[in-house]
Amino acid sequence: MTPKPSGTFEVRGEDNTRDELRRAKRKKLVWGWIDSFGLQAGDIDHLVVTRRGGLVAVDSKWRSRVDDATEMARAAQKVRLRAEALTRDFLKGDSRGSRRAKVNPLSVTSVVVLWGPAQHGIPDGASIDGIEFIAGRKLVHWLRRLDGEHVDEAAADDVLRQLEARRASTKSRSAASS
């Protein structure tokens, strides 16, 4: 396969994941998601608010073969920690109590979604250091199997709105410093 015009296979992996998330939304498995959430120390490819599984931090990868799975798991673990810190920050409200979260901080699950030839060698339930590895074409099936924290629509809307506002303010700060 050749890369899309953007020129990188990683972008193709993120695009493919986005397509699968659209399918999951049509099937009412997720409320929504935020793509490419930039942080000071890296980024999160996709933050997904599920209906029955809290928040899922997705690290999309395009690989011809898996020869660095431990490193990918380590990177996904960092993504999970970033996502947990992010949800704690915006869901706890400020210390004066003027803004209170409508929900408790969501549980965060971090996964690596593999695209490219490597996805065909990933067995169901593959996990390293608590990070699940999912073949890209099985992402919707994996989301369907989630049976954890229920997230109602109002809470999901609130989380997505706050994530989008945080992403917009992060982008404007980085543009101003350029």
Image (cartoon, grey):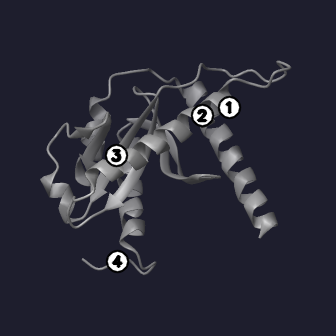
Identify the amino acid type marked 3. Ala
Query: Residue at 36% across / 71% down in the picture?
Result: 9
Of the numbered discs in the image, which one, if any, rests on residue 85?
A: 2
Which mark sits nearer the N-terminus, 1 or 4? 4
Residue that label 4 marks: 3
C-alpha gap between disc 2 and disc 4? 34 Å
Which mark sits nearer the N-terminus, 3 or 4? 4
Query: Residue at 42% across / 67% down in the picture?
Result: 11
Residue that label 1 marks: 89
C-alpha gap between disc 3 and disc 1? 24 Å
53 above or below 111?
A: above
Q: Give coordinates of residue 64: x percent, y percent.
A: 22, 67
Kindly indicate the quadrant of the structure image that contains residue 61.
bottom left
Question: SS at mark 4?
Answer: loop
Q: Nearer the viewer, mark 1 or mark 4?
A: 1
Residue nearest the viewer, comparing 170 with 127 = 127
CB under 8 Å between discs 2 and 1? yes
Which mark sits nearer the N-terminus, 2 or 4? 4
Which mark sits nearer the N-terminus, 3 or 1? 3
C-alpha gap between disc 1 and disc 4? 37 Å
